[in-house]
Amino acid sequence: MMEFLEMGGYARYVWPSYALTFAVVILNVVWARRALARSREQARRRLAMQEEPT
Amino acid sequence: MAWTWFHRLASPPHVYRLAERLTPWFAWSSALLILAGLYGGLVLAPPDYQQGEGFRIIYVHAPSAWMSLMVYTVMAVAAAVGLIWRMKVAHAVAASCAPVGASFTLAALVTGSLWGRPMWGTYWEWDPRLTSELILLFLYLGYMGLRSATEDVQRADRASAVLAVVGVVNVPIIHYSVLWWNSLHQAPSVMKLDKPSMPLDMLVPLLLMLLGFTLYFVAILLMRLRGEVLSRERNASWVKEALSR
């Protein structure tokens, strides 16, 4: 296990690369969900304003 | 008859429903492929005869770099379709691509830098491949900046689409930079017409990662697309139906 983590002496280059890439992978899921939720909320508000009697 | 699919793809309610239904399929299949690729790349693949274990950065660097180029190409094609056929859904696709592409371009640059340090002895060099990839990041950022600076969605769509289409010349420049100029960066080992220059136990995990990241992009794109389509709709009765779910 230790040997695996050491990556033949390249650990300080290999693991940050993996960490950064998967941080980007996860962040994109979070951002996409947030963007969709925001658009739905805005659309809901627009609908509510249209339905309000003037 | 042959064009009905095209017309349906231009219909926002149809696209919204289709995207909603397809997202989990792409998400789960990409997760499986990426996990298999990680296991193959980190555990099963043998160390490289020159770079030892350090070469394993390829399994995150190459997919990130592939995403940076593939996403830009999708964005430019969608922008062109939006400009030519005045198709709202195509503009929505283009707008959905930019943040994904920008973040993976950054990942490609940083993982490349982390790979370059032990192998080339430097984090950064003003090399044709590295410089053209950096320009790609600026193209994405310019696209996003232009969009967020333009209040009106339709004007933002058109202006940013022109930028996306013009910028697409950079894509072949990045790909061929290592062949056209002297570059520190190695020549393509998978994306070429000849057969890949890698043994199978190194290559298969890489192909799994590339396919996994591609399907992952589709899942993210579909999710973002729903939001973009909704934000372009005014007074549409289907919006109410879409929001009820």
Image: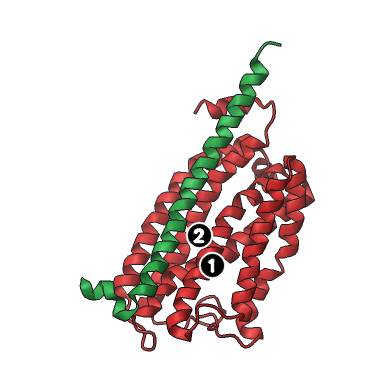
Q: Residue furthest top?
A: A53
- Classify residue B145 as left or right of residue B69: right
Q: Chain under label 1?
A: B
Q: Which residue is most to the left?
A: A1
Residue B86 can be seen in this image: yes
Read off the residue under disc 2: B214
Q: Which residue is mark 1?
A: B66
The image quarter containing residue B88 is top right
- Percent x, y of residue B195: 50, 82
Q: Pointer 2 indicates a residue of which chain?
A: B
Relative to A27, is A3 on the left or the right?
Answer: left
Task: Tell me the SS state at disc 1.
Answer: helix
Q: CA distance from mark 2 to mark 1?
A: 9 Å
Query: Residue visible at 34% across and 84% down?
Result: B52
Foreground mark, 2 or 1? 1
Marks 2 and 1 share the same chain: yes
* Contact between labelled residues 1 and 2, with CB atoms less than 8 Å apart: yes
For chain A, the rendered hue is green
Q: For the residue labelled by badge 2, is the local secondary structure a helix, a strand or a loop?
A: helix
Instruction: Give B137 or B210, whichever is nearer the viewer.
Output: B137
Q: Residue at x 50, y 69 (%)?
A: B110
What residue appears at the point 72 percent right and 41 percent down from the top-left corner?
B153
Callout 1 amino acid:
Trp
Q: The chain drawn red is chain what?
A: B
Q: How many neighbours does mark 2 have within 10 angstroms: few (below 14), some (14-19), or many (20 or more)?
A: some
The answer to whether residue B78 of the structure is visible from this angle is no
Residue B101, x across and y down, in percent: 58, 59
Work out whether residue A28 or residue B121 is closer to the camera in this orientation and state it.
Answer: B121
Q: Position of residue A33 (x, y in %)?
A: 49, 42
In the rendered view, would you say B12 is above or below B29? above
